[in-house]
Image: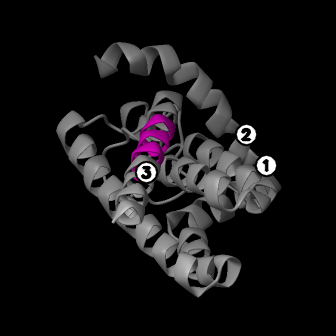
Amino acid sequence: MFDRLDMLEWQLCQRTAGLSIHRPWLSTLKISSKLGDWPIWVALILALPAIHGRDIGLRLMLEYTVTAVVAIAVYKLLKTRLCRERPFITFGGSIQCNEPARDRYSFPSGHTMHAVMFCTLVAVHSPALLPWLLPLAGLIAISRVGLGLHYYSDVLAGAALGYGMALASLGLSSTTLLIAASH
């Protein structure tokens, strides 16, 4: 399945990764990717009590942390079962890797999954943060292709997975609150 998709996406990924010859753009992609590793999301989680007050903030901290841990488990399960080679591996000479890869496989994009997941949670709980987080999430997503680490479909799948995980979390947390309120 991925062989055919790889060939369809190859030229677009090659063009996107080729833009990394411009140093300012490459620096932007690398910084975005590093922030998307974990620092920005940990900072967001730790800031929740300051944003929402102690009680609500601690509940949201727990919700965001549990959601992230479950998302990582699902992501790793998918990644190790589907085994899609990264574009710089499949198309070695034509797509350059501009950042060390943690592993051999690309599907789905975990960086994008987290970016979309946290933006979705923030849209519900702290929408005033979205003007800051949405551009960063976009840069994180494009950095994955621009650095030669992912295909566009990896990024789209990561975004869908992150959105789904956030919706599941929001659904569970609202159900839990309704049950607690009824007792």
Residue 165 on the magenta segment? yes
Q: Of all residues shown, which one is farthest toward the left?
A: 81
Q: Mark 1 belongs to which amino acid?
A: His
Magenta residues, start to end: 159-169
Q: Are marks 2 and 3 in contact (CB under 8 Å)?
A: no
Label 1 vs label 3, nearer the camera: 3
What residue sits 36% from the left and 59% below the top? 176
| Image quadrant where residue 80 sits | top left
* Residue 85 highlighted magenta (yes or no): no
Position of 155 with respect to 136 (left or right) is left
Residue ID at (56%, 56%):
118
Tell me which amino acid carries mark 3: Gly
Task: Say what secondary structure mark 2 lies in.
Answer: helix
Q: Crowding near pointer 1: few (<14 within 10 Å), some, many (20+)? A: few
The kind of secondary structure the magenta stretch mainly shows is helix
Q: Is residue 87 above or below residue 141?
A: above
The residue located at (30%, 57%) in the rendering is 70
Res. 104 visible in picture: no
Instruction: Identify residue for label 1.
Output: 22
Instruction: Please give the residue where the numbered disc 3 appears in the rendered image.
Output: 110
